[in-house]
Amino acid sequence: MSMTSIKRWMNPRVWAYVFGYLFAVMMIAPLLWMLISAFKEPGSTVTILGKLFGTPFSLESFAKVMKPDGTAMMWRWTLNSVIVGVVQTAITVLLSSWAAFAVSRIPFKGKTFIFALILAGMMVPVESIVVPLFQMVTDMGWSNSYNALIWPGMMLPLAFLILKQFIDQLPNELLEAAKMDGAGIFRIWARIIFPLSSSSMAAVSIFIFIQSWNNLLWPMLVAQDTAMMTLPVGIPTFQSIFATDLAVPMASNVLASIPALLVFLFFQKHIIKGISMTGIK
């Protein structure tokens, strides 16, 4: 090996690329294994690398997952996840935007305390409030309903923080001009704050939707009825039937990952743009 080659390999930038590619392979490998296993026939051996690529590919595992025979209610679970994710995202973004606008631009007593109280919610683990929250939902008769799945998971402190950071950066002259034209608080929000914060709201919406889509703990507690389960709850129940057959569970995981993956791929530029506009690092 020549001296030039040695110097090239000693370059820290080269090793940064090497470790970067290795890390990327480590992250992608489980996803590729899940995808390839899903296209194998039910009962195929997918834990041995040679047999994973040797056995023929098939769509039978997907057909078995989507077959409405009562074993797997994929269509119903997907519908539940979509309803919960979309409604929860829309209401959370709306409430967070109103709260962020109020704390950022409307003067009132105790504003600093309310802001600190909302931020303190980011430090409280969900597990610590599950028991009283579950008791409240049970007392209200919301068990096994969309109300129990949707309402307790709204108003995330992170959504409020991101939107407030953006609203804080808006010039005061813009809002003062609207007030001089006779615009009220709601009109200022609807005509100025809402359009200008669309990128930040899009980023927040993606965060909330993906978190709602992947939520396991709370839906598992309040949705004991099979027909009311979401995908993260229903799929493990379905997979327990195929403990020795990994092809079918992998097919169900692939189907469950597609909606959240598509949302992220189509709107990923809004995440970067929205976060960069808020000044959050």
Image (spheres, rainbow, N blue to C red):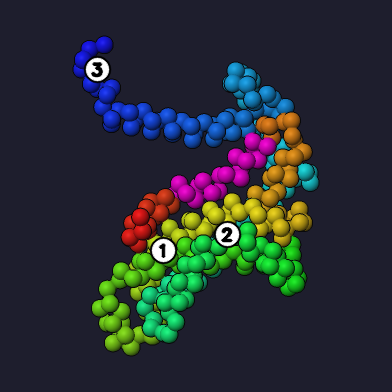
**209 lies left or right of 103:** right
Q: Nearer the viewer, residue 49 or 180?
A: 49
Residue 136 shown left or right of residue 28 in the figure:
right
Using the numbered discs, state the Cα–Cα distance from disc 1 to disc 3 in whole angstroms.
Answer: 48 Å
The part of the chain drawn in magenta is: 249-266
User: Which marked residue is nearer to the observer: mark 1 or mark 2?
Assistant: 2
Pointer 2 local density, CA inside 10 Å: few below 14, some 14–19, many at least 20: few
Figure quadrant of the N terminus: top left
Residue occupying image coordinates x 38% and y 33%: 20
Q: Which residue is mark 2?
A: 125
Disc 2 from disc 3: Cα separation: 52 Å
Answer left or right for 238 relative to 161.
Answer: right
Evaluate whether residue 124 shows in this view.
Answer: yes
Q: Residue furthest top?
A: 1
Mark 3: which amino acid? Ser
Sequence-wise first label, 1 or 3? 3
Q: Position of residue 132 (x, y in %)?
A: 68, 67
User: Considering only vertical position in the picture, is 243 above or below 223?
Assistant: above
The answer to if 147 sits in the magenta stretch is no
Front-lying residue, 21 or 9: 9
Position of 21 relative to 138 (above/below): above
Left or right of 3 in this view: 133: right
- Provide the residue designation for mark 1: 162
Q: Residue at x 30, y 71 (%)?
A: 170
Q: In what quadrant of the picture does the C terminus appear?
A: bottom left
